[in-house]
């Protein structure tokens, strides 16, 4: 059976949510009366809506969250953007431009650029599984 590892509080009007850090029952009830929604995060990743009265500080059972380092996110973001740039070059190709001598600059094959960018993104995904 899954265990609760965290709680989130969601503001449907502002469409924002954050990790719950204050488990004072009076404050939780007041927040619920003001329209806040509480979400229990289970150890298997499932999320469940819960009432303020059911919220209590979760017990850690040697389960910790892994925080991604900025470099990890940056690598994946750059690789993802490269894939989308390559797709854009295929969908909306730009005319070749000429240099000062009037010769057209060599452009890479957009399909090959896409394949290369996608392979790089997949390689990062494979590295993330290890």
Image (tube, rainbow, N blue to C red):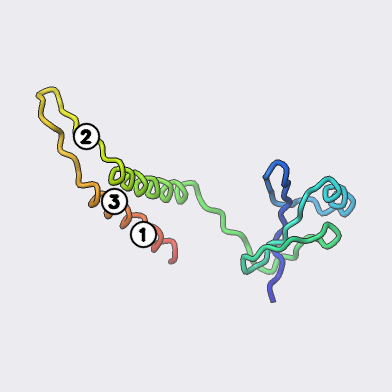
> In this view of the protein, which residue sits in the foreground, 48 or 129?
48
Residue 39 percent location from the top left of the image: 72, 58
Under circle 3, the secondary element is helix
The answer to whether the residues at label 3 and label 1 have Cβ atoms under 8 Å apart is no
Q: Name the residue under label 2.
A: 95
Residue with the most extreme top position: 100
Which callout, 2 or 1, points to the residue nearer the camera?
Answer: 2
- The picture places residue 113, in percent across and down from the top left corner, at 25, 49
Q: Which mark identifies residue 122?
A: 1
Give the residue number, with chain letter if any, for mark 3. Answer: 114
Q: Residues within 10 Å of mark 2 (few under 14, many from 20)?
A: few
Looking at the rendered structure, the secondary structure element under dot 1 is helix
* Dot 1 alpha-carbon crowd within 10 angstroms: few under 14, some 14 to 19, many 20 or more: some
Count of marks, rendered view: 3
Q: In this view, does 46 lie to the left or right of 110?
A: right
Compared across the picture, whether 125 is left or right of 111 comes to right
Q: Is residue 10 above or below residue 122?
A: above
């Amino acid at each position: 059976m899954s265990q609760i590892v965290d709680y989130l509080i969601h503001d449907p009007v502002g469409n924002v949510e954050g990790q719950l850090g204050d488990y004072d029952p009076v404050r939780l009830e007041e927040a619920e009366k003001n329209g806040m929604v509480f979400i229990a995060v289970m150890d298997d990743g499932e999320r469940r809506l819960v009432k303020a009265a059911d919220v209590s500080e979760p017990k850690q059972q040697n389960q910790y969250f892994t925080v991604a380092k900025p470099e990890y996110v940056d690598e994946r973001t750059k690789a993802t953007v490269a894939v989308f740039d390559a797709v854009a070059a295929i969908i909306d190709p730009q005319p070749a431009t000429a240099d000062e001598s009037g010769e057209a600059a060599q452009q890479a094959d957009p399909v090959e650029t896409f394949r290369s960018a996608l392979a790089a993104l997949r390689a990062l995904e494979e590295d993330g599984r290890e």
